[in-house]
Image (tube, rainbow, N blue to C red):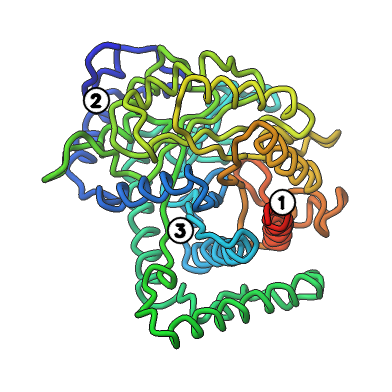
Amino acid sequence: MNKWSLNSWESRPQAQAIDYPDSEALTGVVSRLRTLPPLVTSWEIERLKQQIADAQRGNRFLLQGGDCAETLDDCVPTIIANKLKILLQMSLVLIQGGKRPVIRVGRLAGQYAKPRSKPVEERDGQTLPNYFGDLVNQAEFAPNARRIDPHRLLDAYSHAAMTLNFIRSLSGGGFADLHHPEYWDLSFLSRVELPLELRAQYSEYTRQLSEALRFMEALGEGSLDELTRIEFFTSHEGLNLHYEAAQTRRVPRREGYYDLTTHMPWIGERTRALDGAHIEFFRGIRNAVGLKIGPTADPDEIVEVARALNPQDEPGKLVLITRLGAETVHQVLPNLIDKVRRAGRTVLWICDPMHGNTKKLKSGVKTRDFEDILLEIERSFDLHEGCGSHLGGVHFELTGEDVTECTGGGVREVDLDSNYATACDPRLNYRQALEMAFAIARRMQARRRRRR
C-alpha cells in the first residue's frame, strides 16, 4: 500500500461522508480541535492493547457496551454513572462465570456519529438532511435542527471531555472498588420487575467476590491492585474522519500516531472498503482497532483488510466484531474463522448480537428480541469451539436506564411505547443486560466443567 500520512485518507473514496456546506467553518473547527488537549492518553491505549493481546490468548474476556448513539443531552451524572454501573455488574457476573479478568470497554464519550442508509429523510412531503448523530446535527425533524453544523464537532469534544472527567473522578474516588461491589446496585435493582432469582444471584456473586478478595489479602498477597482496580476504556465508531484526524498526533517517547479521541475506535460495516478512506486512515494509527463484519462480508476481503490494518500482525491490535444474525451466523462464521486462521492473522473475535437481529414491526418501530440476541451468542460460542477458535468478547447496545426498546426479559411488544427513548437503534435495558450476563456466565461455567 502507499505510504501513510495524516491526511492520505482525503484522497480515498469516503463512505458516509458528511457534506458540510460551509467548508471554511469546517477548516476553522478542525484547526481548533488540533490545538485542544487529548481526550485519552497513549499509555491508556497501550494498556488496552496489552489486555486485548491477553484476551487473544484466552486469558481475558472483553465486554463492550453502551448507547447506540450518545446524545449531548445525556451528559448527565446519573446517566453516565448508571452506564458504568451496569457494565460493572455485568463484568462481575462474567468474572464469576469465566474465572478470568474482564476488559470493560464502554461505547462512551464519543459515540456521537451514526451511519445512515440515506443522506436525506422525508416526512409529510418535507425533505431534510438525515440525522447523522449529535456530532453532525440534531434528531428533531426541523430545518434548524437538521442543519449540518461543523461547530458540533467542538460541542462533541467538550461533552466527551466532561464525560471522561466524570468517569475518571468516579473511578479514582472508589466508585468501582471491587471490595464493595454491593454499592454498585442501581436504584431500581430492588424493583419488583427484576426477578427475585436475579437479585439473589447477583447478591451471592458480590458476596463471593468480596470474600475471595479478603481471603487472598489475608494470605499476604499484597494490595491486590491488579485484581481490585477497575479500569474503563472508551470506544466509538470512527465515522467522521475530520474529528478523528484532528485529534490524531505523535506523542513524546513513542513511535507513530495515536488517535486520542478514544482508546479503541472501530470501523463500521458500511465503511470498511479496502480502498476506502476509513481503512486508509485507521491503518496508520497505533490504537487497537475494531472491525465490524456483517453477513455479506467476503472472507477473503476481510483477510486483506486485516493485513492492511495490522501488517506486522501485532498482538492486541485488531478486534473482529461479527454482527451476523442468529439465523445466519452458522452459515458465515466458520468460513470467516477458517480464512483468518489460514492467513495467520492474530485477532480477537467478538460477537455483536444486536445489529443482525434488528426487525421492524408493522407500526414502524425497530426492536430486537432477547432470545434472538442470546441465540446468536450461544451459536457463536459453539461455532468457535467447533473450529478450534474461541469467542473472546461480546458487544452490546445497552443502557443503565429502564427503557423498553427490546422485547423479552420482561418487555412485551405492547410495552415498547412505555419508554422507547433511543436516538437510533433499540438497546437492552438494565434487567435485560444483567440477564444476558448471567446467561453468558452460565455458558462459561459449563465449558469450564467440560474441560476439567
Q: Is residue 417 above or below residue 198?
A: above
Q: Looking at the rendering, in which quadrant would you find the C terminus? A: bottom right
Q: Nearer the viewer, mark 2 or mark 1?
A: 1
Tell me the distance, in whole angstroms, between the alpha carbons under discs 3 and 1: 19 Å
Tell me the distance, in whole angstroms, between the alpha carbons under discs 2 and 1: 39 Å
Q: Which residue in the protein does label 3 denote?
A: 75
Tell me the distance, in whole angstroms, between the alpha carbons under discs 3 and 2: 29 Å
Identify the mark nearer the N-term, 2 or 1: 2
Locate residue 410: give its quadrant: bottom right
Q: Which residue in the protein does label 2 denote?
A: 24
Q: Which residue in the protein does label 1 denote?
A: 420
The foreground one among 350 and 83 is 350
Q: Is residue 52 visible?
A: yes
Q: Which residue is drawn at the image coordinates 44% and 85% (left, top)?
A: 219
| CB contact under 8 Å: marks 2 and 1 | no
Q: Amino acid at mark 3?
A: Cys
Label 3 environment density (alpha carbons within 10 Å; few <14, some 14–19, many ≥20): some
Disc 2 secondary structure class: helix
Q: Which residue is drawn at the image coordinates 55% and 25% (left, top)?
A: 269
Query: x%, y% of residue 406?
Result: 75, 48
Is residue 46 left or right of 291 when viewed as pictured? left
